[in-house]
């Protein structure tokens, strides 16, 4: 028989969420500033209401039942929406507002000073937290730990990073598309040769770790041609790869989006750009849509809507 939500103490849902996160009665009790006995009593009420054990005691802690697994994300969304309602500003400049962003560098750093100034102008007492773009960023959006993620995706048909592969819970908007270019030191020996695929592959490459992988769409295109590059150095992101490519006394080359020319100019990196030595159809597979990502539950959140529009205005003419 279907139960009415009015028969459930909604405070119990907070307890349930913390139990799901901590997998421990003791740890959940500590976060709630109550005794473990109080949490155990709350869990008993939840079990009775859901007519399910919800968690099974194991030597490694609480293990969720299939029912608990099925409702865990819905519960997180419920709590996040409740937080938005309670935090809804009563005026135009609420105190203590937090902005939490995940973005690749140097993309964020190109406009971060301007973005932070606009945030503080509108919300003088706001705090800003920026975390690096990484493999966990999508999950962080889902968990409510990140407001907006700003990073590149891929267009190669075999890529795991296609926009069409995003979870249904994630909304997105493409700000601009860019094509990777090859970046070489001003005195790199390759610049004295004819620029073609053979020259490109003759020298060792700096690669970046893209979503926990050292290869990306560039390597897929090369594989289709029956070729591969020699990856001599793998780094966390474009910023580090450009820095290393600019260092003297080596023959390493980097591949990074064309927008990085602005970063190189700002930091006076002695780098020269060359186009990837592919035909038009192959380059199409390498296009990078730089995209804003956020959770659907935040689509009408005033803070997120304002932040999206502010970022769009700053990056509109980045290329």
Image (spheres, helix red, strand yellow):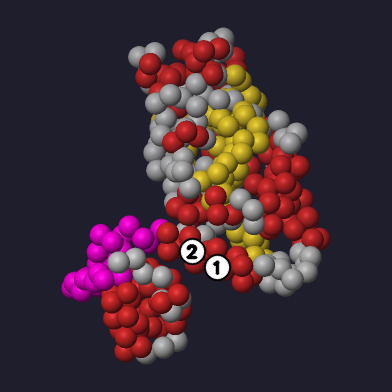
**Residue 78: assigned label:** 2
Residue 73 x, y percent position in the rendering:
41, 58
Q: Is residue 157 above or below residue 137?
A: above
Which residue is pictured at 35% across the width and 88% down the height?
38
Q: Name the quadrant containing residue 195.
A: top right
Task: Name the one closer to the observer, 276 or 21.
Answer: 21
Would you place residue 202 above or below residue 154 in this image?
above
Q: Residue at x 19, y 72 (%)?
A: 58
Looking at the image, which residue sits at the far left? Answer: 59
Q: Disc 2 vs disc 1: Cβ atoms closer than 8 Å?
A: yes
- Determine whether 220 is above or below 84 in the image: above
In magenta segment, residue 230: no
Left or right, 253 with reference to 42: right
In terms of secondary structure, where does tag 2 sit?
A: helix
Q: What is the span of residues highlighted in magenta in the rendered image?
A: 50-73
Name the one closer to the observer, 185 or 33.
33
* Image location of residue 37, percent across then percent down: 32, 89
Residue that badge 1 annotates:
82
Tell me the crowding category of disc 2: few under 14, some 14 to 19, or many 20 or more residues within 10 angstroms, Cα based: some
For mark 1, give the secondary structure: helix
């Amino acid at each position: 028989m279907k139960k009415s939500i009015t028969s459930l103490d909604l405070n119990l849902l907070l307890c349930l969420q913390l139990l799901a996160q901590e997998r421990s009665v003791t740890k959940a009790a500590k976060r709630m500033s109550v005794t473990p006995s109080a949490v155990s009593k709350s869990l008993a009420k939840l079990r009775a209401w859901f007519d399910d054990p919800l968690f099974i005691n194991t030597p490694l802690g609480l293990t969720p039942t299939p029912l608990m697994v099925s409702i865990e994300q819905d519960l997180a969304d419920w709590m996040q929406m409740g937080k938005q309602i309670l935090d809804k500003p009563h005026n135009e400049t609420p105190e203590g507002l937090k902005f939490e962003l995940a973005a690749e560098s140097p993309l964020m750093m190109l406009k971060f000073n301007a973005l932070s100034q606009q945030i503080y102008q509108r919300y003088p007492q706001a705090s800003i937290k920026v975390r690096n773009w990484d493999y966990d960023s999508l999950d962080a959006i889902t968990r409510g730990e990140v407001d907006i993620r700003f990073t590149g995706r891929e267009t190669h048909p075999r890529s795991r990073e296609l926009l069409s592969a995003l979870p249904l819970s994630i909304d997105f908007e493409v700000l601009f598309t860019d094509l990777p270019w090859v970046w070489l030191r001003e005195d790199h020996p390759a610049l004295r040769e004819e620029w073609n695929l053979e020259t490109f592959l003759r020298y060792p490459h700096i690669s970046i770790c893209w979503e926990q992988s050292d290869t990306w769409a560039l390597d897929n295109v090369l594989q289709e041609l029956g070729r591969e590059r020699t990856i001599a150095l793998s780094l966390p992101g474009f910023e580090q790869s450009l820095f290393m490519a600019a260092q003297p006394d080596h023959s390493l080359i980097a591949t990074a989006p064309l927008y990085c020319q602005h970063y190189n100019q700002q930091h006076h990196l002695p780098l020269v750009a060359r186009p990837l030595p592919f035909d038009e159809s192959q380059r199409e597979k390498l296009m990078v849509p730089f995209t804003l990502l956020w959770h659907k539950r935040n689509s009408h959140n005033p803070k997120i809507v304002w932040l999206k529009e502010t970022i769009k205005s700053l990056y509109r003419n980045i290329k």
